[in-house]
């Protein structure tokens, strides 16, 4: 029974680990400007989103103008913004918080991350 449970645990958790290993190592609270440099060095390119696809509140519209990869940006606390990046067929999302300083909150795969 223990072997069966161990096998189940590996089947469930190993794919999640391999996806996590494919994500860029951007620690929480890293300034977004620094995260952008790391992503470019890793071969990622900022997505180029049309104005129609960008959803920034009026108070945060300068972020959508400054970053073509900005998908959405809210004014209400915690002032969360979402940025899309591409590499090959992979699309990742970098979420930030902060009104004045954009700080990385999390990184997740949106599409194209292989599960091994």
Image (cartoon, helix red, strand yellow):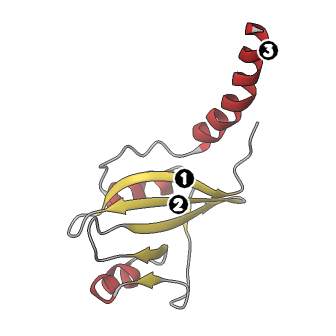
Where residue 44 sits, quadrant-wise, is bottom right
User: Residue at image x 29%, y 77%?
Assistant: 75
Q: From the top left corner, tell me how far across and down residue 104 is, in percent.
A: 36, 54
Q: Quadrant of the C terminus?
A: top right
The residue lying at 26 percent from left, 68 percent from top is: 77
Residue 54 at x, y percent in the picture: 49, 83
Residue 97 is situated, as x and y percent measured from the top left of the image, at 31, 61
In the shown orientation, is residue 114 left or right of residue 23? right
Comparing 78 with 24, the one in front is 78
Q: Earlier in the sequence, mark 2 or mark 3?
A: 3
Left or right of 109 in this view: 34: left
* Local SS, label 3: helix
Q: Which residue is mark 3?
A: 4
Q: Residue at x 28, y 64 (%)?
A: 78
**Label 1 to label 2, Cα distance in Å?**
5 Å
Circles 3 and 1: CB atoms closer than 8 Å: no
* Residue 108: mark: 1
């Amino acid at each position: 029974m223990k072997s069966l449970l161990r096998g189940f645990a590996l089947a469930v958790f190993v794919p999640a680990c391999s996806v996590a290993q494919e994500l860029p190592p951007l620690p929480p609270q890293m300034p977004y400007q620094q995260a952008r440099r790391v992503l470019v060095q890793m071969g990622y390119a900022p997505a180029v989103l049309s104005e129609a696809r960008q959803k920034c509140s009026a108070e945060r519209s300068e972020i959508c103008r400054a970053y073509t990869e900005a998908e959405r940006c809210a004014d209400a606390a915690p002032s969360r913004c979402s940025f899309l990046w591409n590499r090959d067929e992979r699309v990742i999302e970098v979420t930030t918080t902060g009104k004045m300083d954009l700080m990385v909150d999390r990184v997740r795969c949106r599409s194209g991350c292989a599960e091994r």
